[in-house]
Structure formats: structure tokens, C-alpha cells
Image (cartoon, coloured by chain):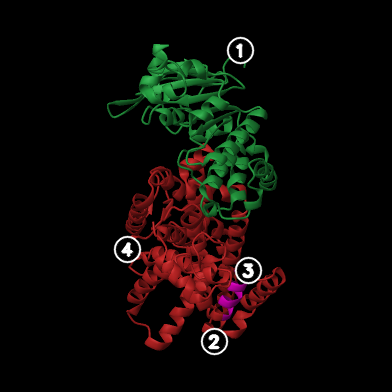
Amino acid sequence: MTLGEPLLRVTDATRFYGGVAAVAGVSFAVQPGEILGLIGPNGAGKTTLVNLISGLASPSRGQIAFQGRSLAGLPAHAIGRAGIARTFQVVRPFQGLTVRENVAVGAMYGRGGAARTAAQAFAHADGVLALVDLAARAADPAESLPIAGRKRLELAKALAMDPTLLLLDEALAGLRGSEIDEAMALIRRIHATGVTILIIEHVMKVIQGLCSRVVVLDYGRKIADGAPAVVMADPAVIQAYLGQRYARAHGLLPTPDAAHD
Amino acid sequence: MNLAILVGGLILSLVVAGRSAVTVRRGALVALLGLALGAPLLTPNPLTLAAVAIAGAAAVGWNIIGGFTGYAAFGQAAFFGLGGYTMAVLVARSTGSYGLPAGLALPLAGLVPALIAALIGLVVLRLRGHYFAIATLGVGIAVRELVNNVDCVGLPSLSRPLFCLGAAGGIILPPLRRSEVAATNLTFYFAALGLLAGGTLALALLHRSKFGYGLRAIRANEEAAAVMGIQTTRFKVLAFAAGAALTGLAGGLQVLINGSVLPDQSSIFDPYRSLEVILICLIGGVGTVWGPLIGALVLYAVQEALTGLLGSGDWRPVFFGAFVILLILFLPRGLQQFTTGGGRPTWRILWRNLTANRV
């Protein structure tokens, strides 16, 4: 990878389901080391885009390249081993395995997996469990965790794969106030270890707090791409996603009173 | 006497698989091995015990694909039969067979079903859930009909056929001399025991291996397993083939005991075998290391006890139908739930299973 080349480049990505384009001609790049936010209303195509990147669906048109290599035709497991890990919006713990075993699977088969024995994978998993603060629940069945714990487990499974790029699909949805703050701190810790992050999130506080750049989708198309403050003041974004009330409350639009001043 | 041996073995294996202290479990394992090795001294006919071990070994094969990987295969009888026919072709001395010693032929009775399973698996393992179950049900029937109708297969350039399956006539193995029978029956028993012990050991190793964790991840969620770097197709095909190999070995041994393969309903392809391996794992615990052993001991002990009470009649299908329903309602995770359930009272475990949310 040459200097200045993006870690991930999505060019004209398009995916049809039947006659509907869930993602239509979306292009953007993820630079190494950044936290990129991906926002947009429900049904805008955010999860479809993550599916295209992680190999669970293939683009009907367009290109996705990771570290300069095209991902076209690569199966999901090859993309995972190449260094792209993802979480699922509806968490998918491996039932029947303990919390520790769940995380160890990521360490066995992710980017660093081929070189690890089962015992080494478990040792690696213990480090990840400590990072996400699940060490105390290591021996419990995965399905016994409360929702906040399951969200952290989902993150830990992805993290154990030693990803270069981490795709977080609403990893914080369903968490309460204090839990959100903890999760944001955790994502910052993960980022500090050198992982590039693409995050889908509806809570704007999270996007503003974490992201250096935001891409906005609406009806499968990209409608904005830039710094959070700039994007959130964009009339098209307010119209499609944030809404007038949100914009006024956060000073992004002049309030009716302010207009008289 | 057989019943006492089976029940004794069952109690010991439940302790081995349970949550007692390690020393207790080790002691039970030693006692279990001692009982298995000494059993021929206690019983007039070790072949009835060999049948239990063969059924258990066949069920170990199903447990790899159906239990660990979560693909409910309903055609395991196909691989039992293929193993059996492979053995017959290799050992018989008629036209189109090879007259090999049984010991040399046995590995191939595992290898041939494994290769065929790999080919079939590449197609049917693309299906999931009910579709996979129905496809394997079809495979079980199709393989039986194919094999039962093939006489000799060869190439035009060869003067001898490659192999003969005998079509409606089947294949008859060379008969044993009367003086050999007792010693041979003992050999069969130990061979079957070795297969079951080896299969259970393989499950124990699989349970803690990277490959085994890959299979269990696939069982829990195939898409999540794939994005985590697991080559799901390759893993499923390997599991299907490994399961077919073990079931095929069991079939090969069964044919040596039978002395022939004959294409009728109670043949080596008996479709009941497909259900029996599942029933055994259900009883003992699907996807567990000790499930096939425990399940085989329970099933054959119950059979033995009922045959004593009711005689050998047509009660078997009715009884096992009811048995499956009760198991699924009250003990969906098998008998081992009692020994790993943390000492909760029996009725509470049964009641909780009955009222638990079912998918």
C-alpha cells in the first residue's frame, strides 16, 4: 500500500434486490487510522453497504478495494482473514459456546488465526475480554449475557480477529446513557490500538464524539460526505435525516426567534 | 446378563461425562474400560454387545455432522451401507471382488463412503434446515436403490469387472470354519469396541480443536462464522465426510459379522439405521462427546429389557416413536442434562424443558 492510498475504496457500489437499488452508485474512501461515520434514515442502505464490504452480498455493479486489492469475488471468510471484521446490528453470539470460546473463534480464524494454536487463540481471547471488560463473564454461556454484554461480546468477537478495518453496524443501539459513554470510551481505546473504524450509528452524540468524517446515505445514494459539523448543517441531510426540530435544537438552523434579531 | 453390563456401562459413562470431581471421573473411566474389556467373560455371546458398539460408532459419525455442525442428516444409512458393500467387495472371493484380509479392507470401508459423502456434500450442504434434511433423506434412498440394482461395473478395455455388487443376489463372504467362530466373534467385539472408543476419543479431540470450534460456530450462526474467517463450505464438507467415514467403518464391521450383504429391507442399507443414529444422539445428548456412547447404551438396554418383557415383535416402531416425542418434550438435550444440570431435582429439569420457549 503506497502512502496516501485509502485503506478501503468503494467505487460506484450498487446492489439491486429485485428491481430496487438498496445501494445506488455509492463512492467513498476510508483513510487509514480514521473513524468514519455512516448515517442515514432506516432503509437508506447502510447495512447493505456493510454486507457488500464484508462479502455477505456481492455488488451488482461497482468496485470495492481493500489495501489496493479488489474484493470482487472473494468469499466472506477470505475478507475476514484479510483484515476486515464486522459486527451485526442484531447481535449473533455463538450459542452453546461460552463467552471466552466465542471470542477465541475470532482469534482462531481471523487475520492472525492461521498462525495460532487453539491454546494461543484462547490466550489472545483473554486479552480481548479484558479490554472489553468481559473477563468476569468468560466462562458463562454467551446467551446468558444481558444486552449490553452481548453488544460488547459482538465487538470482542470482531476485535479478536486482529482487524485492520472494523465495521460497526449499530454496535451501540439499545444501550442506555451510561452504557453509551462506556462503549464510546471502548471504541476510542480500540481506535488507539491502530484499528481503522467505520461506524453506523443513529445516536448523533456518538457520531459527533467519535468521527472525524461522516458519510450520509439516503435511499441508497450518498448525499453528503465531510466533517460532522459541516455535514450536519447541510440542508439536504437535515431534510432527509436529522429533521428540522433536531437541527433547531442543536443550533444548526436559525430558530424562528433568531430570525427577528 | 447383557442388560446388567449395559446398565453398568451406562452408569459409569454418565459419571465420566458428568460434573463429578476429576478423580471420580477418571476412576469411572478406568472402570468403564475394564467393564468393556471384561464383558466377553460375562456374556454368552459377545456379538450382541458388538451390535451396541457398532450402533454407537455409527452414531458418532452422525454426531459430527448432525450434532457438532448442526446439519440434521437423515441419510446416514447410505454411508453405513456403502461401508458395508465396500467391505464385501474387498473381502469376498467371488467374481468382481478382491479377497483381501478384513484388516486391510477396513480402512477403505471408511474411505470410500467419505469420498462419496464429500461429493454429495458439495451439493446438498448448500441447503439448510428442513431442505437439507429432506435432501439427505433422498440420498439415503437413492444410494440404496442404486447399489441394490448394480451387478457388475467395469471398463470395456478390461477383461475382468472392476467390482460386482451382485444386484438382487448380493455378495456372500467366505464362510468361517466352525472352529474359528468363537475366536472370531471375540475379535468382532473388540474391533467394534475399538471403533466406538476411537470414535469417542476423536469427538473429544474435535471438541477442543480449532476445527471443532469452527463447526460449532457454523452450527450457531453460519453467516457470522463466515465473516469471522471460517471457510464454511470446506468445513461442512469435511465434517460430512468424516461422519460418513465413521459410519462407514461401522457398516463394514457389520457386514463382516453378517457374512453377507443382501438387498432386502433389513439389509445393510436398512433405513431404520438413519433414524437410530439420530435417536441415539438425542438420548445421549446431540453434539456432545459422550452422547453417542450413552445413547447407544440406553437404547439397547431398553430394547433388551423390553424384548424380555414383550418378546421380539413389532412393538419397536411404536415404542420408539413415543420415545422420541417424550425425549424432545422433556429432555431435548439428552440424559446428560441430569448429570450436568447442577444437581437440580429431576422433576424441575423436566418441567422447565417442557415449558421453555421453543424455537
Mark 1, residue position: A4
Q: Which mark is residue B1?
A: 2
In the image, is residue A96 part of the stretch drawn in magenta?
A: no
Discs 3 and 4 carry the same chain letter: yes
Discs 2 and 4 carry the same chain letter: yes
Mark 3, residue position: B19
Chain letter, disc 3 residue: B
Q: Give the amino acid at mark 2.
A: Met
Identify the mark nearer the N-term, 2 or 4. 2
Distance between mark 2 and mark 1 Cα atoms: 79 Å
Q: Secondary structure at mark 2?
A: loop
Figure colour of chain B: red
Q: Secondary structure at mark 1?
A: loop
Pick the front one: A171 or B323: A171
The image quadrant where one finds the N terminus of chain B is bottom right
Mark 4, residue position: B168
Residue range corresponding to the magenta coloring: B8-17
| Labels 1, 4: front one | 1
Task: Using the rendered view, name the quadrant where residue B258 is placed.
Answer: bottom left
Percent across and percent down for residue B108 are 53, 55
Task: Using the rendered view, name the quadrant where residue A197 is placed.
Answer: top right
